[in-house]
């Protein structure tokens, strides 16, 4: 496709996000299952439900544009999920692996925040005010998820990873 108008770029980026969200629908249950922290499991399960809503919102945006949502693979999300999958398969201390899972999840959230911020701006510029509202709602949820992951990392997961690492180090010194 030739990207010679902002409208075409907008639709192309929406398709990218649609595919990314659908990839996440498959990845989030695996992340929840791999998490050892109950709070982290719950965060992923909650975000899975939100992601289903993100897909529906994108479908509404596409319907308003009289466009089909399919036709593009989000290679960036595919790479982020593959990278995160490597962490899920690692052996080691549970909280350290949970810390790694949070890193992978936040990479995904930051990618989505950038994408939704851009398409929301395009929607405004193109006079797609209803679409801009829908995209802003998703952007808000992605930001909230990122903040939740920050809080979990700072208050629960990372301090526990430090404790487990210190304990593992102390037992190996004996």
Image: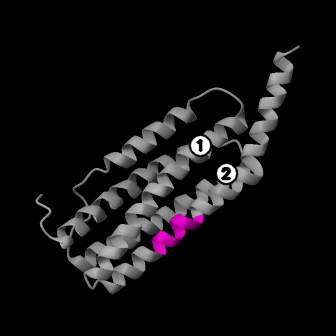
From this view, report whether residue 133 is shown above or below residue 162.
below
Residue at figure coordinates x 62%, y 62% from the top left? 147
| Number of other residues with Cα within 10 Å of mark 1, as a class: few under 14, some 14 to 19, many 20 or more | many
- Would residue 138 be counted in the magenta stretch? yes
- The rendered magenta stretch, by its main secondary structure, is classed as helix
Element class at badge 2: helix
Residue at figure coordinates x 48%, y 47% from the top left? 27
Element class at badge 1: helix
Location of residue 98 by image quarter: top right
Residue at figure coordinates x 27%, y 85% from the top left? 127
If the image is split into quadrants, where does the N terminus sit?
A: bottom left
| Number of other residues with Cα within 10 Å of mark 2, as a class: few under 14, some 14 to 19, many 20 or more | many
Check contact, mark 1 vs mark 2: CB within 8 A: yes
| Spatial separation of the CA atoms under disc 1 and disc 2 | 9 Å
If the image is split into quadrants, where does the C terminus sit?
A: top right
In the image, residue 173 lies at what x, y percent?
A: 85, 16
Whichever of callouts 1 and 2 sits on the residue coming sooner in the sequence is: 2
Location of residue 159 by image quarter: top right
Q: Relative to the observer, which residue lies in front, 126 or 78?
A: 126
Q: Which of marks 1 and 2 is in front?
A: 1
In the image, residue 101 lies at what x, y percent?
A: 59, 43
Please say whether residue 34 is visible from this viewpoint.
no
From this view, report whether residue 1 is shown above or below residue 120.
above
Q: Which mark, by number, is residue 115?
A: none
From this view, report whether residue 38 is shown above or below residue 131.
above
Residue at the disc numbered 2: 40
Please give the range of residues in magenta. 137-144
Residue at figure coordinates x 21%, y 56% from the top left? 71
Describe residue 64's horizontal placement relative to residue 91 as left or right: left
In the image, residue 44 lies at what x, y percent?
A: 59, 54
Residue at the disc numbered 1: 101
């Amino acid at each position: 496709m030739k990207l010679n108008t902002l409208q075409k770029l907008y639709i192309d980026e929406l398709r990218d996000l649609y595919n990314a969200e659908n990839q996440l629908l498959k990845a989030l249950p695996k992340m929840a299952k791999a998490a050892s922290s109950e709070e982290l499991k719950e965060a992923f399960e909650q975000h899975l439900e939100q992601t289903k809503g993100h897909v529906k919102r994108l479908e509404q945006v596409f319907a308003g544009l009289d466009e089909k949502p399919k036709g593009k693979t989000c290679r960036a999300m595919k790479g982020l999920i593959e990278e995160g999958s490597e962490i899920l398969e690692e052996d080691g201390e549970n909280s350290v692996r949970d810390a790694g899972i949070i890193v992978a999840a936040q990479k995904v959230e930051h990618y989505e925040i950038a994408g939704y911020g851009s398409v929301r701006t395009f929607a405004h510029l193109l006079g797609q005010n209803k679409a801009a509202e829908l995209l802003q709602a998703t952007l808000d949820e992605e930001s909230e998820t990122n903040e939740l992951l920050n809080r979990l990392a700072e208050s629960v997961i990372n301090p526990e990873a430090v404790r487990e690492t210190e304990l593992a180090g102390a037992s190996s010194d004996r």
